[in-house]
Image (tube, rainbow, N blue to C red):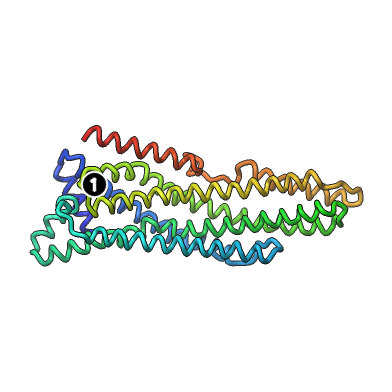
């Protein structure tokens, strides 16, 4: 952190018109800021993360089909473990690539003059920690939002799929026996609605966390991805350029991961909405249960509006809706940034 700060200071104070050096300094500066902010968000949101974690590992949301619930929980845990392993592999790959000697890296990852004046041995030690362990110092912080909040997002999606399965089972039983006891069906729907409301209360917490995490990721990625590809094209093919491309690709995958989770959650919400709509259309009115019928139908319609009215969609502080189209827009913007920097170089 100290070495990078000194490097940035030297470039800015030198008032050099070299676009390459200035772009590299700005990437370093934004990386320091964003990585620090992401860690700050995780620490500041400790209670919210703990609340979501307790909800996900609890059995307060269940479908009534134990085998299905167990399968969804296993899928969630396996996906979370896989994501964590991939993160570790990416960090190790970057560390190895940066450790490979490269003749042109002196100008690209040059130590500050203050360190060079301390002697040859100190320079070698400082370079090892500043360059070889660069990824180890920053990638875990950059990816901290995916490791923590992304894992919670996957857990909440699994819970919502379990809830969707519960609605499906209620509809299936009612379709097979339209004359079923209204009180039994009313009790099952009340339990499902109770779980739905609890899920929605925790979803609001998740939505706030995702907004904060993606806002930082979006602001960082919207220019740094194009800038990094520009930097990788400006140096000859080497382990360093491969490392830059790998890091940039990881940033794109992170952004796509958020968009994919938001899309799949919206798909589950729409499936619940369709199931509830079909339940409402098939519910038979009975005079002796008129009050319960009206209350239940009203509750179901409210849930249907929440599911199909975009209440479960996610946006980034109103700037854009989190979806695959947002990822496509990011690609267009990053390409434009890269082409702009190449045109003025």
Determine if residue 302 is in view: yes
* Residue at 61% over, 44% down: 311
Q: Please state the horizontal and vertical placement of residue 242, each as a whole percent of the image.
A: 28, 52
Is 224 on the left-hand or right-hand side of 21? right
Q: Please state the horizontal and vertical placement of residue 50, each as a whole percent of the image.
A: 52, 64
Specify few, some or many for label 1: CA neighbours under 10 Å numbering under 14, 14-19, or 20 or more. Answer: many
Q: Quadrant of the N terminus?
A: bottom left
Is 294 on the left-hand or right-hand side of 196? right
* Residue at 17% over, 47% down: 11
Circle 1 residue: 24
Q: Residue furthest top?
A: 343
- Residue nearest the viewer, comparing 242 with 217: 242
* Residue at 50% over, 61% down: 79
Is 199 on the left-hand or right-hand side of 255? right
- Residue nearest the viewer, comparing 297 with 240: 240
* Residue at 43% over, 48% down: 255
Q: Please state the horizontal and vertical placement of residue 343, each as a whole percent of the image.
A: 25, 32
Dot 1 falls on a residue whose secondary structure is helix
- Residue nearest the viewer, comparing 291 with 86: 86
Is 78 on the left-hand or right-hand side of 115? right
Q: Quadrant of the C terminus?
A: top left
Q: Please state the horizontal and vertical placement of residue 204, each as a whole percent of the image.
A: 57, 52
Q: Residue furthest right?
A: 288
């Amino acid at each position: 952190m100290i070495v990078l700060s000194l490097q940035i200071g030297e470039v800015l104070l030198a008032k050099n018109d070299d676009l390459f050096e200035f772009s590299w300094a700005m990437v370093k500066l934004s990386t320091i800021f964003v990585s620090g902010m992401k860690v700050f968000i995780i620490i500041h949101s400790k209670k919210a993360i703990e609340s979501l974690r307790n909800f996900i590992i609890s059995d307060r949301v269940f479908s009534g089909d134990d085998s299905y619930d167990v399968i969804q929980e296993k899928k969630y845990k396996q996906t979370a473990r896989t994501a964590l392993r991939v993160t570790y592999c990416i960090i190790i790959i970057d560390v190895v690539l940066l450790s490979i000697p490269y003749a042109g890296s002196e100008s690209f990852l040059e130590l500050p003059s203050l360190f060079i004046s301390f002697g040859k041995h100190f320079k070698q030690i400082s370079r090892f920690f500043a360059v070889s362990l660069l990824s180890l110092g920053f990638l875990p912080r950059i990816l901290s939002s995916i490791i923590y909040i992304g894992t919670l997002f996957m857990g909440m999606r699994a819970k919502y799929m379990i809830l969707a399965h519960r609605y499906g089972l209620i509809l299936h039983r009612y379709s097979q026996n339209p004359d079923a006891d209204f009180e039994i069906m009313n009790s099952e729907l009340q339990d499902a609605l109770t779980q739905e409301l609890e899920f929605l209360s925790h979803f609001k917490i998740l939505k706030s966390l995702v907004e904060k995490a993606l806002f930082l990721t979006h602001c960082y990625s919207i220019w740094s991805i194009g800038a990094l590809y520009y930097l990788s094209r400006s140096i000859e093919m080497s382990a360093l350029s491969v490392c830059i491309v790998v890091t940039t690709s990881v940033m794109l995958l992170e952004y796509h991961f958020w968009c994919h989770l938001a899309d799949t959650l919206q798909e589950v919400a729409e499936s619940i909405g369709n199931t509830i709509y079909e339940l409402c259309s098939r519910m038979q009115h009975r005079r002796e249960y008129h009050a319960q019928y009206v209350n239940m139908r009203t509750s179901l319609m409210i849930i249907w509006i929440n599911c199909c009215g975009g209440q479960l969609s996610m946006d980034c502080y109103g700037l854009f809706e989190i979806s695959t189209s947002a990822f496509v827009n990011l690609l267009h913007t990053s390409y434009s940034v890269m082409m702009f920097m190449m045109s003025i170089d």
